[in-house]
Amino acid sequence: MPSNCEILCEIIIAILLPPLGVCFRKGCCTVEFLICLVLTILGYVPGIIYAIYVIVFQHREEYFDEYRRPIYSA
């Protein structure tokens, strides 16, 4: 389980170089990385948005234990 500092560092890297942030989280030969690479080539901002989405929102249920689970999650 990554710490808050690791997630923050990945977000900063994702803002500077979006595909690199996704590569750290998912790996270099994944669909997420290729989507982020294409979005970054087509436009820098869509690449950043997608990279932050991949880092923060995908598989976030594994980062919440039963005591830190949000109220809206069932």
Image (cartoon, grey):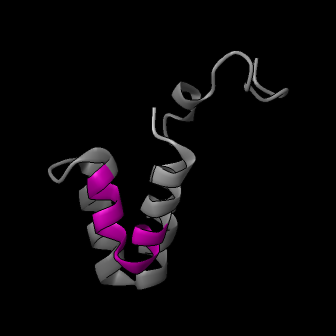
Residue at image x 40%, y 84%? 43
Image quadrant of residue 35?
bottom left
Image quadrant of residue 66?
top right
How far across and how far down the image is residue 27, in percent?
22, 48
Residue at image x 49%, y 34%? 59
> Up-down: is 41 above or below 74?
below
Horizontal arrangement in the rendering, residue 17 relative to residue 10 (left or right): left
**Figure label count:** 0
Horizontal arrangement in the rendering, residue 72 relative to residue 31 (left or right): right
Question: Is 18 inside the magenta-drawn segment?
Answer: yes
Principal SS element in the magenta part?
helix
> Up-down: is 65 above or below 42?
above
Q: Which quarter of the rendered picture does the C terminus lie within? A: top right
Viewer-proximal residue among 67 and 41: 67
Q: Which residue lies most toward the right here? A: 71
How far across and how far down the image is residue 34, in percent?
24, 59
How far across and how far down the image is residue 12, in percent?
47, 70
How far across and how far down the image is residue 61, in percent?
58, 27
- The stretch of residues the image draws in magenta is 12-24
> Up-down: is 42 above or below 74?
below
Residue at image x 14%, y 50%? 29
Whether residue 31 appears in this view of the structure is: yes
